[in-house]
Amino acid sequence: MKSAGGSHTGTGTWLVQRASAVALAFALPVLGLYILAALPADYAAWRALFAPLAWRAALVLTAAALALHAWVGMRDIFMDYVRPTGLRLALYLAVIAILAGSVAVLAASLGSLA
């Protein structure tokens, strides 16, 4: 049986942090250029901009990568600097709720465009 501690417990989270950073480094400029090329001025233009399913999916996946990246960073900060276990757990739950809720609201908003 594996022990809960060890010298390699942070390797997985380190890889998640780096993989999400690479995904964001690719996706954010592409999405930014896509929006800048269209320069939507009103609601109808914004709606048409994200009408293609591929762009809606790309935006949701980018938001999920950003949330995952933020979660790993916040979790590490809380582990390092917040000593009371109850407070740390409350902060974990608050950050998870905010990040997951943000991605869910984005997905629901983009889903209503179909």
Image (tube, helix red, strand yellow):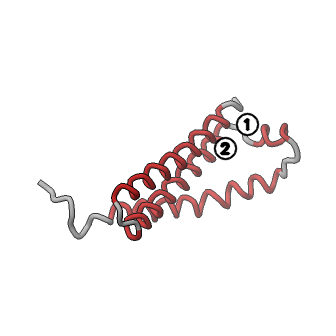
Which of the image's four quarters has the C terminus? Answer: top right
User: Which percent across, then down, holds residue 60?
Assistant: 59, 45
Inspect the image, locate mark 1, and give the three-letter code of the amino acid beneath it. Ala
Task: Judge from the rendering whether residue 17 lies leftward or rightward of residue 23; answer left or right.
Answer: left
User: Which percent across, then down, holds residue 46?
Assistant: 80, 42
Residue at x 20%, y 59% (from the top left corner): 4
- The circle on residue 51 is 1
Residue ranking furthest to the right: 41
* Vertical side of 58 occupied by 110: above or below: above
- The circle on residue 34 is none
* Vertical side of 72 occupied by 52: above or below: above
User: Which percent across, then down, holds residue 5?
Assistant: 21, 63
How many numbered markers are drawn? 2
The answer to whether the residue labelled 1 contacts the one labelled 2, judged by CB atoms less than 8 Å apart, is yes
Which of the image's four quarters has the N terminus? Answer: bottom left
Residue at x 77%, y 52% (from the top left corner): 35
Q: Which residue is nearer to you in this view: 19 or 87?
A: 87
* Vertical side of 76 occupied by 56: above or below: above
Q: Secondary structure at mark 1?
A: loop
Residue at x 84%, y 41% (from the top left corner): 45
Q: Which residue is mark 2?
A: 55
Inspect the image, locate mark 2, and give the three-letter code of the amino acid beneath it. Trp
What distance separates the C-alpha of mark 1 from that of mark 2?
8 Å
Q: Label 2: few (<14), some or many (≥20) within 10 Å? A: some
Q: Secondary structure at mark 2?
A: helix
Residue at x 65%, y 41% (from the top left corner): 56
Task: Judge from the rendering whether residue 114 lies leftward or rightward of residue 90; answer left or right.
Answer: right
